[in-house]
């Protein structure tokens, strides 16, 4: 197999390819452009390539965001949707970035950025690998407590729905919720709702 064939085989396994993925194997990133020009690869977004006939996965957009913004972690409405909690269908991809990080410039998809610091950013990150690509998302319990932390942004009704549904579907435990509520400093705010739900 020549380099081009290796790259196409990798594209079949990974769904989304970057120049860094090709370089990692010792192949020339220039081949991505050549394969794109000959129609063997399609350009999904700036610096991202995939096979033209690859079926689009449910999380294709999320994969692209996590590939293009390495420190982004799916949060709030996007994390709720990822975990199948609640009825939210966000029109933008909600991501958390560490405080002081440069704002990414993406023409598509639209991003809603939340800045977090310390443990509020770093705790509770799960990395889910789909078709060889990593999706970074906050666990269900962290996401629920984030909803209370940012209730003024997304609405208390959304936070309550997330808490009730996550608890009912057993995606969270009281210990996890208390842990992340402490990190997010929303213990007092959540206490009465938590007691009502867990009775």
Image (cartoon, helix red, strand yellow):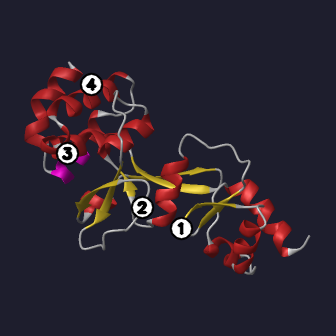
The span from disc 3 to disc 4 (Cα, nearest Å) is 15 Å
Residue drawn 25% across the image and 47% down it: 180
Q: Is residue 181 magenta?
A: yes
Q: What count of labels does the image hold?
A: 4
Residue drawn 17% across the image and 49% down it: 182
**Camera-nearest label, 1 or 3:** 1
Q: Which residue is mark 1?
A: 46
Q: Secondary structure at mark 3?
A: helix
In this rendering, position of residue 143 left or right of residue 69: left
| First-in-chain label (2 vs 4) | 2
Q: Position of residue 8 (x, y in %)?
A: 79, 62
**Camera-nearest label, 2 or 4:** 2
Range shown magenta = 179-184
The span from disc 2 to disc 3 (Cα, nearest Å) is 34 Å
Q: Position of residue 11 (x, y in %)?
A: 72, 59
Q: Quadrant of the N terminus?
A: bottom right
Q: Secondary structure at mark 4?
A: helix
Give the vertical position of 168 relative to 151 (above or below): above
In this rendering, position of residue 197 left or right of residue 49: left
Dot 2 alpha-carbon crowd within 10 angstroms: few under 14, some 14 to 19, many 20 or more: few
Dot 3 alpha-carbon crowd within 10 angstroms: few under 14, some 14 to 19, many 20 or more: many
| First-in-chain label (1 vs 3) | 1
Q: Which residue is mark 2?
A: 107
Q: Which residue is mark 4?
A: 164
**Camera-nearest label, 3 or 4:** 4
């Amino acid at each position: 197999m020549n380099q081009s064939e290796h790259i196409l085989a990798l594209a079949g396994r990974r769904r989304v390819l970057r120049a860094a993925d090709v370089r990692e194997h010792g192949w020339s990133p220039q081949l991505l452009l050549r394969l794109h020009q000959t129609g063997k690869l399609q350009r999904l977004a700036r610096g991202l390539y995939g096979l033209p006939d690859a079926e689009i996965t449910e999380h294709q957009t999320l994969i692209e965001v996590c590939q293009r913004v390495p420190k982004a972690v799916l949060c709030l409405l996007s994390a709720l949707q990822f975990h199948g909690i609640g009825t939210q269908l966000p029109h933008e991809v909600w991501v958390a970035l560490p405080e002081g990080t440069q704002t990414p410039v993406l023409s598509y998809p639209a991003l809603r950025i939340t800045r977090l610091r310390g443990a509020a950013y770093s705790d509770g990150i799960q990395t889910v690998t789909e078709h060889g690509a990593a999706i970074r998302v906050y666990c269900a319990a962290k996401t629920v407590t984030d909803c209370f932390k940012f209730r003024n942004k997304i609405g208390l009704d959304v936070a309550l729905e997330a808490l009730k549904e996550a608890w009912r579907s057993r995606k969270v435990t009281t210990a996890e919720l208390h842990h992340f509520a402490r990190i997010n400093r929303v213990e007092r705010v959540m206490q009465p709702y938590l007691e009502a739900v867990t009775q």
